[in-house]
Amino acid sequence: MSKIISYKDKHVLIIDDMADMRSSLRNQIGSLEITNVGIAASIRDALELLKQKRFDVILCDYYLGGSTDGQQFLEYLRTAKIISRATLFIMITAETGYESVITAAECLPDDYLLKPFTAETLRSRFQRLMEKKIRLQAIDQLHDKSAWLEIIAACDDIIATRDKYLVDAMRIKGNALLMAEKNDEAMQFYEQALSLRAMPWAKLGLAKAMKAKGNGEQAKQLLSDLINDSPNLLSAYDLLGKIHTESGDDAAAIAILDKASTVAPNSLMRQRSLAGLAERTGDFKRVEQALTTVLKKTKNSPLRDPADYVKLSSAYLEMNDAAKAINIIEDAKMTFKGTGELRSVSAMEAQALHKAGKTELADEALDRALSGGSTGISEELAFALAKACLVNDRAATAGDILKYVLQNNPDSEEVKNAVSTIFKHHGGEEAAKELIERSTQEVVNLNNEAVLKAKSGAYAEASQMLTEAAFRLPNNMQIVANASLSLLADVLMNQMDAIKIKQAKEFAVTIAKTNKEHPKLPEISRFLKKIQTKYQLDTPL
């Protein structure tokens, strides 16, 4: 018999646009002796409450009266990590719409409640979900820390008991193996799971493991079969589309995402992916179609994104319709006024105004876009700024911005391809190649100069040089690793400095998050041990 769970200390958030439904839900929640209840009539209200406190349970109606539905809101909350895995999300929907809601859900809630329902139904559902959360609580906490190896061990404990959460533990373990990059073990695990019975999630996991091992063709075949057998498993379409994209077959990727869109036409993520692929293939009509849908569904919603406006405006410029491009920009300026998200919009405005022959206004817009500098900006904003600079005859500034992105993402072929695309109409292939080579060489020169300084005994100068570079290029793991080592060498050869050790360890954590097998991590550990021995430190470093 299940243990009766007390809900008195639970915090529940109710989201519904209908006042009578909010009142009814409030009363039903009250019958469970829950007094900590938040009430929201809209997504905006809900986000404000979620900023203020943590909720154990969210009860959200699917139809929220606006252009954004409960499913899109859930995807946003999970993607933006506004709620943790410990938070239960229950979707409320009418029975008539249930089938379309659940089949189109790629980011699944913890459960669905079909209207109308009684307080007793709510109680029994809470009981079942809370039991599961309690059983998987330790795993959820580890998941929030991305502690994949510990998750695998915790799942093995549950799998060994073969209780009713066996399949849940198996699904979590498979994902953890993939996240820990234990791809051989993941393949073996999923194959064993499939030997028990045909489970779509296990086939999807096996395809992910195949892709991770470089067996893209095998993964494509498995995913094609999976889509035929389980046409509502949207993650399979997305993975197959990604494999096509990475192999350079954008047309096939668009075709598979189009197919997925017939199953889930309301997916913002997929429409944005389609727009990105269409932009790369030069199909700007498709970009317009996809992003017009996104803008319509996110209008007056916290889920709106300035990047959608920028890309749509860019598509209109490519179609030689500067007037429409400017209209979209004006809409974006009103929509994001006072939010601090207008730099990319200003960059796009600079391009549109230049094309319309308004060069002075274009220069003013570009100055606004560039006013925040380039350090720490996203790749998307960097590309928007660079394009605007090239259009407005500021090639040197464009080069500096793109050089920053290239140096901060030294192993990204996607970034290099994007730079080549940008230069297609501004200097051509040779200009892009020269910039990429120069960007790489500058990093090599920086490392070489730091090594020479260290060899000459100028450890402090070397560490300062590399530390500044690591802060400027936080995604360049070669620079970050060398900065960590140079700081520790400085401490070892000169004098004890707790601040430098702390910074070196923080750099090491950054490296480990990216690649736990990074070749410089053992060397960093050896330096820490030498420092501990030299300075006879009691606390391990």
Image: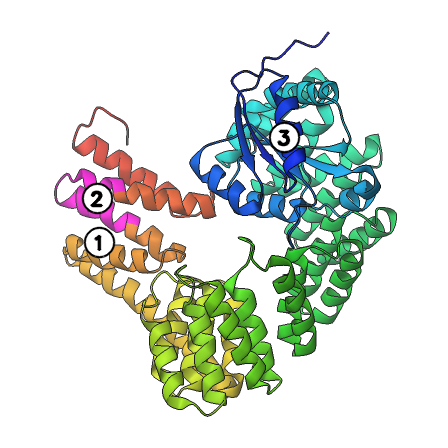
User: Of discs 2 and 3, which sits in the foreground?
Assistant: 3
Amino acid type, residue under disc 2 in the picture: Lys
Residue 394 can be seen, yes or no:
no
Q: State the separation of the CA atoms marked 2 and 1.
A: 9 Å
On the picture, is 534 further left or further right than 193?
A: left
Query: Who's the residue at 64% across and 50% down the image?
Result: 212
Query: Who's the residue at 80% across and 54% down the image?
Result: 263
User: Of discs 3 and 1, which sits in the foreground?
Assistant: 3
Q: Which one is nearer the viewer's eye here, 336 or 466? A: 336
Magenta residues span 484-502
On the picture, is 190 further left or further right than 540?
A: right
Question: Which disc, if any, is residue 500?
Answer: 2
Q: Seen from this angle, which residue lies furthest right?
A: 229
Query: Who's the residue at 59% across and 60% down the image?
Result: 299
Question: Which disc, if any, is residue 463?
Answer: 1
Q: Which one is nearer the viewer's eye here, 524 or 247? A: 247
